[in-house]
Amino acid sequence: DSKKTFETLMREINLYNPELLDKKHLIAFSKSDLLDEELYNEYLFEVRKTFAEIPFCIISSVTKKGLDQLKEMIWSILN
């Protein structure tokens, strides 16, 4: 469950350093190469619905899909 994992991570960040929650962030979902097209589209729909207000990208380090988008998103957040 991506939402539950995200909420757990945010709680842990808050315990570590609450100021980090004020910084811009994004979510990168990995291993998209394991999904066929139909499952990928279902997953994308679910992610868009669940994380509507948080920038995200779906990537695969195996196929390199989405890595350029991820780099661009990181660059835009840092600048």
Image: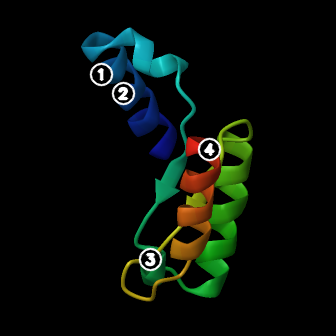
Q: Which of pointers 2 and 4 lies earlier in the amino acid sequence?
A: 2
Q: CA distance from mark 2 to mark 4?
A: 28 Å
Query: Mark 1 against mark 4, which lies toward the viewer?
Result: 4
Instruction: Say few, some or many: other residues with alpha carbon within 10 Å of mark 1 (under 14 / 14 to 19 / 20 or more).
Output: few
Q: Position of residue 74 (x, y in %)?
A: 54, 53
In the picture of the structure, the residue carrying the numbered disc 2 is 8
Q: Nearer the viewer, residue 17 or 7?
A: 17
The single residue placed furthest to the left in the displayed view is 16
Find out whether the residues at labels 2 and 4 contact each other: C-beta distance under 8 Å: no
For the residue marked with disc 1, what is the amino acid? Glu
Q: CA distance from mark 4 to mark 3?
A: 25 Å
Query: Mark 3 against mark 2, which lies toward the viewer?
Result: 3
Q: Position of residue 55 (x, y in %)?
A: 66, 46
For the residue marked with disc 4, what is the amino acid? Asn
In the picture of the structure, the residue carrying the numbered disc 1 is 12
Quarter of the figure with residue 6: top left
Q: Which of pointers 3 and 2 lies earlier in the amino acid sequence?
A: 2
In the picture of the structure, the residue carrying the numbered disc 3 is 60
Task: From this view, report whether residue 30 is shown above or below residue 18.
Answer: below
Q: Which of pointers 4 and 3 lies earlier in the amino acid sequence?
A: 3
Q: CA distance from mark 1 to mark 2?
A: 6 Å
For the residue marked with disc 3, what is the amino acid? Ser
Q: CA distance from mark 3 to mark 1?
A: 26 Å
Q: What secondary structure is found at the residue carrying circle 2?
A: helix
Quarter of the image containing the N terminus?
top left
Task: From this view, report whether residue 79 is shown above or below residue 32.
Answer: above
Find out whether the residues at labels 1 and 2 contact each other: C-beta distance under 8 Å: yes
In the picture of the structure, the residue carrying the numbered disc 4 is 79
Query: Mark 2 against mark 4, which lies toward the viewer?
Result: 4
The single residue placed furthest to the front in the displayed view is 79
Quarter of the figure with residue 17: top left
Q: Which of pointers 1 and 4 lies earlier in the amino acid sequence?
A: 1
